[in-house]
Amino acid sequence: MGGSATSACLVIIIGLAFWLGYTRLRVGYLLSPLSVMILLLVAIFGVRPLRMMQTATFDFYGYDISSGVQFATTVGLVATVGVVMGALVCLPLVGRLVRDNTGVERAETGLGSAVGESFVAAIAILAVWFALSLQFAGGIAAFVAMFGGRTSQISSSAAGVPVVVPALPVVAALVVAAVRFTVEGAARYMPRQNLMYWVVIALTIIPPTALGNRRFLIPALIVGVAGAARILWFRRVRVRYLVAVVLVFVILASIPFVRSAGSRVRGSDDFLGSLYEYVGESGLTGVFDAFFLSYDTEMFNYVSFFGPRLGDAIPYGHGQATLGELFLVMLPSGIAPGEKWSDMLLTEAFGAGCGALYCPVPSVFGTLLVDGGLVFVFLGSFLLGLLAAPVPYQLAVAPPAARVLLLLAVVAFAATVVRGNPVSQLWIALQCTLLAILVFVLLIRRASRRSSRRIIAEPRRA
């Protein structure tokens, strides 16, 4: 295990050194996709394998994956180096772009008049989510039961629900965040607008938190903070905010262990009571250990199990795990021409596809490995670093309303797309982004027409 530990330590050292140099603890860069990607690499391929070695935890649904740990840590190291190299190639070009745009006057869009309407639109989207959730759940009683925790009956009833329905709160968060980020390029929100903004963001966070859907909770939370961070974009995060970051991490790390009905037998039926009891019983050390050794960083175990078998017992995907799977996931299951590559791998290992028995998923780096080995991992990671590095810079210099929502969507969904099952998460992100763009364009047009009418109505000065 000596080589495995060395590779894992190198992932941590290279990843954190680059992360500190890139972000310099500035707010906008801490929220950036590149920052998120590096931290996930450190967690999955650095901290997890070290803790696995310390605790001798090498189980993968009954299989011993200790023989594949060395291979998996090598994959993590190759991915980390690839991401860092891609970012380092891009950053000098981006720095020049920022210097060239310093002091450039930005055109007004008149979107400031649509701030209130953005709140109304977000609440309307949440109302649609509520109505559709009631319909698919089968009534108010079943809907309330969903908030009490997941059960096999609830999970089966949700199987036929279009994935965009539980994602609607993220669409609402994207809309209000994009409007705020755009408007605050010229003027800060007034106190009542700021209050209303955070009320709406809280409303978008409550449903996925109560239901345990972190794939919707995390994007809504990240984009909510990013939308309000334009005036702080280049400032370093204050120490007191780091306490809030630790608190949020503890909550996010605990959700998988309190979201199901079976885990809420400690005496509390509600989410907050179960959360309090879980953290109290486990302590911070237990919460952190459970997170780093649980299925939330199990992508490492996935790579340890499948990686050594690729090209031998299991063929490479050669595009089927990425582009092929994206094509299939966009089609209704009834008309899909074939089985997804990820299900084929699980069938090979466990005799059934995702959800029939188990459903472990790889990170984006594990998906690249399945498609073409270490060469694909490096090339794909290099491209991801190249594309992710300029996002915070592009948000800082982009004209109001130009690409703002699209870039904020990239910021919002980076964690879920990179972390696990990237193709499915990318499809969810695309659906949410298209819906948010539609609402955003309607708001811009209404604001522009209102501004035009106001200009025409003003009397000419002599």
Image (cartoon, grey):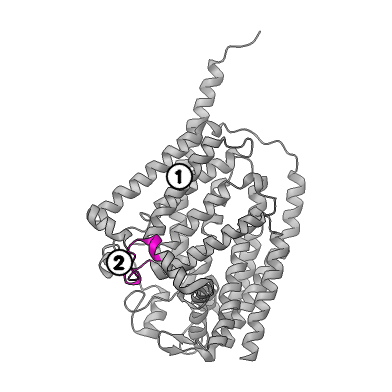
Residue at the outermost top position? 462
**Which residue does the numbered mark 1 point to in the structure image?**
200
Q: Are marks 1 and 2 in contact (CB under 8 Å)?
A: no
- Disc 2 residue type (three-letter): Ser
Residue at image position (62%, 68%) is 38
Q: In the rendered view, would you say 304 is above or below 277?
A: below
Residue 229 seen in the current view: yes
Name the element at disc 2.
helix
Mark sitting on residue 155? 2
- Residue 318 appears in the figure: no
Quarter of the picture containing the C terminus is: top right
Mark toward the start of the polypeptide (1 vs 2): 2
Q: Secondary structure at mark 1?
A: helix
- Which of the two discs, 1 and 2, sits closer to the camera? 1
* Spot occupied by residue 16 in the image (x, y as percentages of width and height): 68, 70
Q: Is residue 273 magenta?
A: yes
Task: Tell me where residue 37 sits by quadrant.
Answer: bottom right
Please provide the residue range marked out in magenta: 259-274
Looking at the picture, does residue 30 appear above or below residue 69?
above
Q: Residue at x 52, y 45 (%)?
A: 177
Percent x, y of residue 174: 49, 48
- Pointer 1 local density, CA inside 10 Å: few below 14, some 14–19, many at least 20: many
- Crowd class of label 2 (few under 14; some 14 to 19; many from 20; radius 10 Å): few
For this view, does 38 lie left or right of residue 437?
right
Which of the two residues, 369 or 389, is positioned nearer the viewer here? 389
Q: What residue is at 48 percent from the left and 40 percent from the top?
A: 196
Instruction: Tell me the quadrant of the picture where the N terminus can be found.
Output: bottom right
Name the residue at 53% across, 86% down.
Answer: 55
The stretch drawn in magenta includes residue 27:
no
Out of 8 and 85, give the one closest to the viewer: 8
| Spot occupied by residue 329 in the image (x, y as percentages of width and height) | 40, 65
Badge 1 amino acid? Val
